[in-house]
Every structure is written in C-alpha cells, then in structure tokens.
Image (tube, coloured by chain):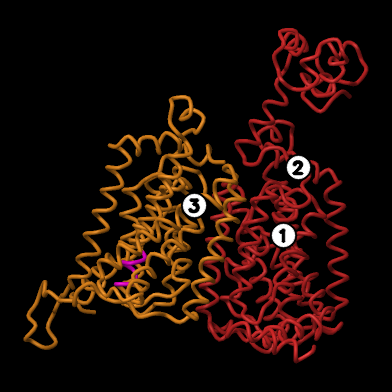
Chain colours: A red, B orange
Amino acid sequence: MDPISADFLARFGDIDLQKIWRDLYLHYTGVTWAFLFDLLTDYSLYLISALGLYVLFFAGQVSLGHAGIVGVSAYIAGIVSVKLGLSFYVALLAAGLAGMLTGFVFWYLVGLRLTLFYLAIGTFAITEALQTLALNSDYLGAALGFHGIPLATKWYHVFIILGLVMFAVWRLEQSRFGLAMRAIRDNPTVAGAMGINVARTKLLAWLFAGFCTGLAGCLHAHRVTILTPPEFSILMSINFVLAPLLGGLRTFWGTIIGGAIVWWLPWITTTDDPRWRLALYGVILVALMVFRPQGIFPATPTRTTGFRGDQAARARSVAPRPAAWSISRSREGGGGRPGITAPGTGFAFERRTIFGYACGDPNHAAAGCRANGGGGCS
Amino acid sequence: MQFGFLVEQVLIGIATGAIYAIIAVGLNLIFGTMNVLNMAHGSAIMIGSFGVLLSYYVGVENFWIGCAVGIVLAFLTGLLVERVAVRPMKGNWWNTKIATIGMAFVLENLVTVITEGRPQLYPRPFNPVYYVVYGDIKTPGGTLIEISNIQLMLIALSILMVVGMVLFLYRTATGKAIRVVAQSPDIARCVGIDVKRTIVVGFAVSATLAGIAGILNGVTFGSTYSFIGFQLILKGIVVLIVAGIGNMRGCLWVGMLLGVIESLSVGLGESTYRDFIAYSGMVLVLVFRPWGLFGEEGRVQREV
C-alpha cells in the first residue's frame, strides 16, 4: 500500500485513516490459505450440529437449547479422554451417545408436551439449568473450565463426519421416517390420524439430532481443548437456529447456505473493533428477516409472510372457487386486471392459467382444479 | 442464622424481584398483543438506564430530568423496534424473534462502543436512609432489620406499575383493544379496532415500562452496563413463563418470589445455584403446567 496516499487521506480528519486502511488491507491480504482452511474446518464442524437442528425443524420441533446438547456431549467427551484416558474414537462414540441421551431428555421433558414457542423456551430453560450445574461442578472444572483435552481433532475427522451426517440427513429426508416427520411438521393431529406414531417419530428426530450434535460436541472439545460453561449459552443456540432460518427453513441446502452466512459473514465484515462487527451483524440479521423472511432459499416461493398471513393465503388458495365467477365478473366489466376486462379476447385462457386449471381437461375447466385441493391436477 | 438477617434478605429480594416483575409485565404486554417474544426489550431497558447518564453527561445533573430523558429514549426505542423489526414480520414469531435479537445486537453493541464496555456508575435520586424496622441499633450483635428508602420506593413503584397495568388493560378503551387484538387480530379488525395503532401503543407502553425498570435497576445496583438488558430479560422470560402468559398480577407475585429466592440463595451462601433454581423451576412449570401458575389453560394449545 502506498504510504503517501494514506497520508493524504488522513488530512481530511482526525480519524487515523492510515491505520484503518492498513488494518483492512492486512485483514484481506494478510490471510493465508491455512487460516482459511481452518475457518472452513470450523464451519464444517458448526454445520454438523446445524444439520442436526435442521432435522428437528424438519420434524416440526424447534430447539433453542442446542448449545445444551453440544455442551453435554463436549463435557462427556472431555471426561472420557481426560479422566478415563481412552482414545479419541471412544470419546467420539461416547459423545454421540451422550448427545442422544440429552436429546431423549429434551424429548421426554418438553418435546412430547410442548410445541413451537413453548418448546423453544423449554429447551432454553433446560440448557440454562445444565449450564449452571456445570458451573457448580468442581469435577468439571467449574467456572475455570475443563482443561487438558488433547488436540485430537484433525481436519479429516471433521470433513468425514460432516460427509456422513450430510448423507444420513439426505437419506433420512427421503425415507418413510422423513415422510412421517414432514407430516408431523405440517399437522401433528392429521399425521396421528393417518397412523403415524407422532411421539416415536419425534423421538427419532431428537435422537438423530442429538447424535449428530454429540459428534460435533466431541470434535469441538478436541479442537478447542478447553471447555467453559458460559460458552454454551443462549447465544450459541441462537447461532445454530440462524442457519436453517436464514437459509430457508425447510431446505437442506438452505441450512448449509445459512450456516455459511452465519459463519463467514462476521469474518468478512471484521473491523479492528469487534463491537462494530456485532452491530453490523445485527443490522444484517434484521435486513435478512425483513427482506427475505422465508430465508434465502425458501422451499416454497415467497407468498405472504407471517404465520397468520401464510394460513390465510393457504386458505384462499385451497378454497373452492366456481369457474363461472371470473366470467360473470368480467362481463360486468369489473375486475381491473388485464385480461379480465376484455371478454372474448382470450381472457378465458388467461383466467384459467391464473387460477391454475389450464390442464386441458374440459371437465376440470368447469369444476376448477384448484377446488380439488390446490396444486393443479393429478 | 439470625432471624433479622433472613428478613433483610427477603426485603432485598422483594426489591429486586420488583424489577423482574416490571420487566415481565412489559414482555407480557407484547406477548399479549402480538403473540411474539420481544428480545429487544432488553435494549429498551438498557437505553432507559443510559438515558439518565446521558443527561448527566450533557450537563443536566438532575436525577428526575434524567429519568424523563431515559423514559423518552426507551419509548422511542420501543417505537423503533416495532417499526423496524416487528411490523415487517407480520406475526411470524421465529422471524420476529431473530429480527428483535438482531435489533438488540445493534443497539447493545452501539452503546458498548460508546461506553467502551465499562460498567458506569449510577447516580442516586436521594441519599439512602436506612430505617430500623425491628431491633435496636445501639445494641451490637442484636437482631436488626433495616430497610432503605430506595428499597421502599422500588417496591411501591413496582406495585403501582402492576396495578396501573391491570387498570390500563381492564378499564381503559385502549387496554381493552389490546386484549382483543391479543385474542384475535381479525376479530379486532371486524369490530373496528385499529390493529396497527393498538400494536404501536402496546410497544410504546411496554418500552416505557422497560425504561423505568432499567432506571430502577441502575439505582438498586449503583451501576449499569451495556448488556444489562440481556441479563435482565432472561429473568423476565422466566417470570413470564412461570406466571403464565397473559396474567399481569401473576407476574408481580412470581417476580417477587424469584427475587426472594435469589436473594435468599445468595444470603445462605449458595449464590452459584441462584440461576439453577430459577431455570429448573421454569422447566418444572413448563412440564407440569405449561400455561403457567396463573395463566389460562387454553392458551398453550391455541398458541402459534
């Protein structure tokens, strides 16, 4: 960087522009491939538990206590490899099982009884209670943290496990269980009436999510080598929730993209003062929620935002609509939309496409395919 | 353990619990109106408490003028949050939650940048005077129960505010409109209530309460810092859930109860278990009575 131009810029005010330029320059150019690779490994590690959370969302469950599962399994992994002196792979398995157990506890205490908002708050409360317990346990190092975990996580562990988890989630989505989970998410009552065992399917989702998150917890413990209870706070849970939420609540790839936003954006926007970075992060969160409420890659095209609006839109689109309505409306000269006001000039065709019964079947044109439940003809 | 010591702890607990109660009432109002949890409530608390400091910094060294500045700033924060992070979401509770968290990030980190993250000393409205309730001050080692006028003011103010909220919600036209909107926005629209305006009023009232809570908290603890709101709002959520959403009187009782439990656990030497009691109690309530100790039962099933 040319020092003369920086000096020239610095004359415009008492802000140390030279320093800012230098910092930014170093920030973006002084980065090494090793550092980027390290960030990528962290991102993959984060994705493992985010995908676990995605499975929960997929089954209509929400969790604001995912940090609790990570924390429990990370501590268990630490105990296995430090206090018991067993190998990393044993710790990995133990952490996975511990995550499953925590998932079971979450399912039994709140997942079975509560939905949506209350479920989120319940998982949050359990996590906070667990955090306080860890803070008081001298065995776990209390507030000073759990030291001495060996640095055993290698990059290929993270990538292999991420690959396996991605494959498992992808297969789970397409299996019968995935179908059952989707049914429960859309309407638990109807799913139960169809013969799906709602409680058991929810349990499966919690166990699966717990196992994935447990693996991530073990990898995390053996990567950072020291665990402190405040680390597993609600902020960590919110970070996990953001991944499926920003990317698109119901899509697999949306979760991965959303996770990328959560993980890489703070780094890209880093300034020399981390507090500005967090403020900027907040601005971006609000902007994303305002302008892309369904996430960046929504499963369905964005229609109306909001639960109530969504429901109303669905009710409108599903409601039976007589085909004659549009014709009589247009003969009166009402409407106002192009294609309605000019009867006889191909308007019927346009109306049909608008209402979605342009399937070519004349019977359907009379009845209206939409009346059969929306989504066109079979 | 002395009897006087216990009573003193209970009195202190009631005074801090009063702050929790006010915060929970504010959250309750938003939850009642919009069916969303306002995570940016904490930033209104924080901005209210920093408003007093702002007026001192500008040169107006009067506590009560500072209070007015803080409350007005908190009020404006509530309006800002409603406009930016709540209205565009149209009632989607996940999105609202994330957007309000984003707002809280922005506001709290901006204040952190301004104050450089240090806890700030807080002015007192008047010098604390300790009144002897029981015992004799002249006999050393005897049972002595004291209460300060600041604690008395806190308790009185919180009871006043909760009573005021109940009267506001059940007696005034605006309060009734808020309750109707909480039941069903569509029906409220049908009977001619301006839903948008009602929601704005709900946010304004709630943020004003938050500002008052922030000021009271600053007075009680003698200092404030930029993440105070986030700490307090978690306690507010506990009180809200345990008391039951939609019940103002319940918030008062549970808030005071939580304050007393916390202060007793500190006083008895188990201060690290303070939060554990609160959160495990909340889990128990959610497991056995999800609608809360004072709430209406139908609410949980109806919830979005």
Query: Which region is colored magenta?
Result: B214-219
Residue at (70% x, 87% y) in the render: A8
Residue at x-position 29% and y-position 51%: B162
Marker count (numbered): 3
The answer to whether A330 is drawn above or below residue B136 in the figure is above
Q: Which of marks 2 and 1 is nearer the N terminus?
A: 2
Query: How would you classify the magenta stretch by its main secondary structure?
Result: helix
Between B32 and A167, which is closer to the camera in this rendering? B32
Give the Cα distance between marks 2 and 3: 26 Å
Quadrant (top left, top right, bottom left, bottom right) of the N terminus of chain A? bottom right
- Residue occupying image coordinates x 26% and y 70%: B63
Q: Mark 2 points at which residue?
A: A182
Q: How far is disc 2 from disc 1 in space, using C-alphas?
A: 19 Å
Q: Is mark 3 on a helix, strand or loop?
A: helix
Badge 3 vs badge 1, beta-carbon distance below 8 Å: no
| Gap between marks 3 and 1 measured at Cα | 27 Å
A34 vs A133, left or right, is: right
Mark 1: amino acid: Ala
Residues marked 2 and 3 touching at CB (< 8 Å):
no
**Where residue A183 sits: x, y (%)?**
74, 38
The amino acid pointed to by label 3 is Leu
Of B299 and A308, nearer the camera is A308
Tell me the kind of residue under disc 2. Arg
